[in-house]
Amino acid sequence: MTGTLLLLGAMTGQAGKPAATSPSLEDGAALLAGQALASDGAWRKLATLCDTIGNRICGSPELARAVTWGAETLRADGLQVTLEPVQVPRWVRGEERVELVAPMARPLHALALGGSVGTGPGGIEADVIVVASFEELAARAGEATGKLVLFDVPWENYGQAVQFRSRGAAAAAAVGAVGALVRSPTPVSLSTPHTGAMNYPEGSPRIPAVALALEDSAMLRRLAERGGNPRVRLTLGAEDRGQVTSHNVVGEVRGREHPEQIVILSGHLDSWDVGQGAQDDGAGCVAAMEAGRLLAALPVPPRRSVRVILYVNEENGLSGGRAYAEAHAAEAQSIVAAIEADTGSGPPLGFSFDLRNPATGEADPEAGARAVAALQPLVHLLRSSGAVTLTVGGSGSDISPLVELGVPGLGLSQDTSGYWPIHHTAADTLDKVDPVLLARNTAALAVMGWVLAEAEAPLPRATALAP
Amino acid sequence: MTGTLLLLGAMTGQAGKPAATSPSLEDGAALLAGQALASDGAWRKLATLCDTIGNRICGSPELARAVTWGAETLRADGLQVTLEPVQVPRWVRGEERVELVAPMARPLHALALGGSVGTGPGGIEADVIVVASFEELAARAGEATGKLVLFDVPWENYGQAVQFRSRGAAAAAAVGAVGALVRSPTPVSLSTPHTGAMNYPEGSPRIPAVALALEDSAMLRRLAERGGNPRVRLTLGAEDRGQVTSHNVVGEVRGREHPEQIVILSGHLDSWDVGQGAQDDGAGCVAAMEAGRLLAALPVPPRRSVRVILYVNEENGLSGGRAYAEAHAAEAQSIVAAIEADTGSGPPLGFSFDLRNPATGEADPEAGARAVAALQPLVHLLRSSGAVTLTVGGSGSDISPLVELGVPGLGLSQDTSGYWPIHHTAADTLDKVDPVLLARNTAALAVMGWVLAEAEAPLPRATALAP
């Protein structure tokens, strides 16, 4: 033990008792990366979360258990833990059945979208009109009355494909449809429907909304093109049970010099109600937690405080991120940076910086570029994780309310090619997570957290840090 | 028209009227391959089969409709069609539900194996013992009494993995288990269970057998290793409804010189009761049918007869293949070769030759090598399809009863990397079939059928052709 301390720093203190000093930025980064890459700590946390709790939609008993587990784990790892209350929706899927009833009868592979209304036990049945864009729906609006509108839109990327999931029901309701079907936003499928959030704008009729597996969506298109006049029955038990109280889990490693200055490492603890929420976002949570453990175990704390935040309600409302920003608005000027990991556990590529003008909430790409430029000389410290590419762009959903207050936001960039086919599906399970890649993501967060918390000067931002 | 005929052969006949002659082996192969590769005929057939009939398990109304469709299509394409009766099992899945009940409750993604008994509406519930081999089960036999045995065996290849599906229930029953669970035999999964055939040996207790998605199988293993003592409930509506009459569909292009000598092109029309049976074996059927159409459309028929056979009951009994061999045993010595396509619609690679001694039914690799050697000089005719590699090995399930009678069997070899993850699943759908590759498979069958039917000497076999 003494040997380790000697190795890490110079001896100081009284009466010959060695007192630890902080390692150099380089040595600390090497130590943290080396520990993260050699450890299966994040993986073991994820296995516990997935296999003893499982998926954890907002308001579920499983999310409550996950909050308790997150708090206990962070505490055991040496962080000071607080639970911050958040009101979250309690949407329950219930039993559901989606069937083609004409021109032939067959079950369809589908999941109601999160937030969708149910149909009542009698279900609804209607002919299907198949469109490939909002524009096509507008052009064929006259055909949609009383029908189910299927948005069968081939995948280009997530941002493009997800629009139909989010806004499809509203667009369909606006032209008199009785329900919306959307092709699951994914490039690859093994008859795998993808759930996810949808919204009813104020005043919009609330019609049921369902994601179909790519295969079934493609089949309905072919049937329609063949003149087969497909007809579908939806029986959805979905139910909105109002709001319940949940909690963001916050664990802190208090800084040694500027404890009031804070670096946030985060993910979100809630998931959809299928699969295990292993990559979305169990992986982000455990990488942040494990990075927090390693930072808490340093011989002396970093210069600034590090907070690990496990948000709730990223998937269907973002109330966790909003509640945190609201409760901590007064200290937003002291939050040096907020980092979020929420795109799975593929190979880490780098960090994407989102800096905004706190007066307007608008992106400030020049400020982003200055932040990137300030860190660029230190990017070699991230080499062992692979996360070496710093870019200006978005960051993370949960931290976006903080980012709008002027907090520099960093999103962990990852190779997402293996992520989109499984996220929000029954296949988002532990077996898809490579322990080696998870350790590399942990290393990326630990090193970036360390650099931001330890570097002499804080990260440049759109407007200066509070004095 | 006249121009085409002139191009294809010399003018003969009386009164200046051009009479068609057979093209050379080379020209015929080029013509057939060129037509197959430029046509979407096989694809359109497959779309009709998949989208207007769908999956078609033995004994279902869908298989009856597929038989009628197959016969009508072959007839419309110029073949002489007969329906040959076959007794097939009528196994019905019914409603089913497979659930983890402890240490936590969650639905499992599962399909009863074809032929499994049901559980009655009350279901059965038992603790799970997880094994990785038959040997491990034998070693832990004492633990299995009254339990569900899960064979969680990682994929090496189909032949290795499928044993546990076929024989797992018998092995589990032999040590007193009340049911068998098997990890779906696949290298890749998106929470996708694979059904398939299983057998109860004479005298074996008939316990329910279920395939789990890879994800759920892996989770049960992890729970067991964690000491979580997983407990599963099976509620299976599966039911054996005895035997019903179906039909092999046989379409013939009658040979011009040796009509009694026959070359068979085949696939199987039945499928499992999930997905669309697009690759297993819709693709093989339509490739054989389209090759038959092209051969029937030649200016003059080939020297020998070509029969397109759409077998029934490959999936759960092989009674179609057996019935055909039995009914045609007397002419087995005149069947020059039987070709089957039944491994999907990946890139065609070549043909695998299975020649057997009719006295013993044993493989005769020397005879296989002679057959390969006889065709090797003509392999360039297959180049445009890509099916240029001739090997000695297996052929096809449905033709195996003929092969045991001494008929040379040829299996169309294909790249199966995209096949195993989808066959026997809800994801075996039309969208997975590449029209260009389907056309190449059609070309391979058409050219090989042509070569075997037209070449002056018949293919060498283990014992000589009947005079």
Image: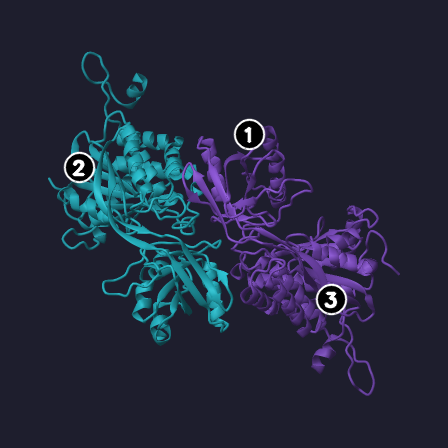
Chain colours: A cyan, B purple
In the image, residue B238 sits, relative to residue B324, either above or below, namely: above
The three-letter amino acid code for the residue at tag 1 is Glu
Look at the numbered disc 2 and give the secondary structure of its residue: strand
Marks 1 and 3 sit apart, C-alpha to C-alpha, by 65 Å
Look at the numbered disc 1 and give the secondary structure of its residue: helix
In the image, residue A465 sits, relative to residue A144, either above or below, namely: above
Nearer mark to the viewer, of 1 and 3: 1
Marks 1 and 2 sit apart, C-alpha to C-alpha, by 58 Å
Q: Position of residue A335 (x, y in %)?
A: 18, 41
Mark 2–mark 3 CB contact (< 8 Å): no
Label disc, if present, on residue A261 of the rendered structure: 2
Mark 1–mark 3 CB contact (< 8 Å): no
The quadrant in which residue A454 appears is top left
* Same chain assignment for discs 2 and 3: no
Left or right relative to B118: residue A206 = left
Q: Is residue A455 visible?
A: no
Left or right relative to B447: residue B48 = left
Disc 2: host chain: A
| Quarter of the figure that contains the N terminus of chain B | bottom right
Q: Position of residue B107 (x, y in %)?
A: 44, 46
Label disc, if present, on residue B26 of the rendered structure: 3
Q: Which residue is mark 1?
A: B143
Look at the numbered disc 3 and give the secondary structure of its residue: helix
The three-letter amino acid code for the residue at tag 2 is Gln
Q: Is residue A259 visible?
A: yes
Q: Residues within 10 Å of mark 2 (few under 14, many from 20)?
A: many
The three-letter amino acid code for the residue at tag 3 is Glu
Disc 1: host chain: B
